[in-house]
Image (cartoon, helix red, strand yellow):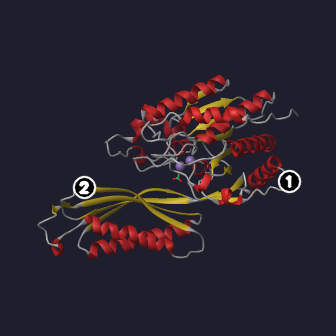
Amino acid sequence: MQTLSKPDESRLWADIEALSAITLPDRPWTRRPFTPLYAQGRAWLKREMKSLGLEVSQDAASNLIGRLPGANPSLPPLMIGSHTDTVTGGGRFDGIAGVIVGLEIVRMISESGIVLDHPLEIVDFTAEEPTDFGVSTVGSRGMVGNLSDTMLGSKDPEGRILSECIAGAGGSPERINDSSRRSGSVAVYLELHIEQGPVLIQAGLPLAVVTGIVGIGRYQITVTGQPDHAGTTPMTMRRDALTAAGELFVKLESICRESYSAPVVGTVGVVNVSPNAANVVPGEVTFRLEVRSVDPALIDTVCERYLSEARRMIESRGLAIRIEELTRSEPVNVSDLILDTLQSNCERTVGKGTEVPRIPSGAGHDGNQLSRIAPIGMIFVPSLGGRSHCPEEWTDIGPIALGAEALARALLELDKKL
Ligand code: GLV
Ligand code: MN
Ligand code: MN
């Protein structure tokens, strides 16, 4: 068997610089989905994929796919992927590191003269991060048939419809459900991602194997009071939607700070106040919250308790509350076969004496959706200061290259095993 060539750090770094530089100039590093910048980033990626000789296509959900044929075309593809959209303001590595490592692995395989048995697909999943439509992992949901008509019909604050945005990004929303991939049609899904937390950097270690991915429950709550003059309405006669919603923000924090059998985190990350004026008592507040845990029963327990408390608190103030479930993703556990394959190849790559810990992912990923149809596995590389989803997000190229090498080795092993 041919020897696999090493990843090239300077090539990897040049790609990360080129793609991350496609950002809103006054708000680095921002490339929101369904924007001209996003299309520009994808045009860059498409050119790179073509220059590597990959067959480039977009599926019905608008995922961008570069395919390297295998020796046995009847086998389902091995898949490596991540995303090129970002949250507003960062980061520079979240998502693109995994896509660019996919390109580098294709180069390593081609340079080594290796022909895989399975086809290999490198995928840039559309809109992994939470969108203004209230849906995240849009492309991977679409790929596995988990993007409902309600989700496709949802509107963003500008009145755009998700299905139209998917069509604008090169997809065919009317075909998503019929053309979605079925269980067994992908041999394995692998992803390298930055850790986005402090474990690796604090331990001074370059790689971790991900044991599973948290599930997420997301809701939108609208609290309706009454807009009134902020100077003339006595404090006892107000129906202030913002002070009422403020109590709900704090309530989520206090419920999630209690101790449970597994970690639970809860966040209010979007707030819209109407009319949002200094001299008007807020009449309506809409906010989005999420609860995450590796234990699905805990997500249910915490959400049910929080939502019933929220209802009681708002009604006791004489205000109205509307609760809508936006999305729900189930936690995922990585199988022993994939864990062991990733672990042994990470250990071979980092060398004897360097520990490769196993850690769960508190962040959501496309693997969460792919697990519905295929075994999945992930490798983490360290995030400086544990920071992510912010402009300071940083990962050194050394660990990214090590991760690329470990993932490529694991891929070759799985090509023979699966
Ligand atoms: C994705 O980055 C998420 O965890 O929300
Ligand atoms: Mn992210
Ligand atoms: Mn990500």
Position in image of residue 350 (x %, y %): 80, 49
* Horizontal arrangement in the rendering, residue 67 relative to residue 269 (left or right): right
Q: Quadrant of residue 304?
A: bottom left
Q: Nearer the viewer, residue 79 or 255?
A: 255
Residue at the disc numbered 1: 352
On residue 276, the disc is 2
Residue 248 sits above or below residue 190 on the image: below
Q: Earlier in the sequence, mark 1 or mark 2?
A: 2
Residue type highlighted by circle 2: Asn
Label 2 neighbour load within 10 Å: few <14, some 14-19, many 20+: some
* Horizontal arrangement in the rendering, residue 364 relative to residue 70 (left or right): left
Q: Circle 1 — which element?
A: loop
Q: Circle 2 — which element?
A: loop
Q: Residue at x 62, y 59 (%)?
A: 198
* Horizontal arrangement in the rendering, residue 68 relative to residue 84 (left or right): right
Q: Residue at x 49, y 29 (%)?
A: 40
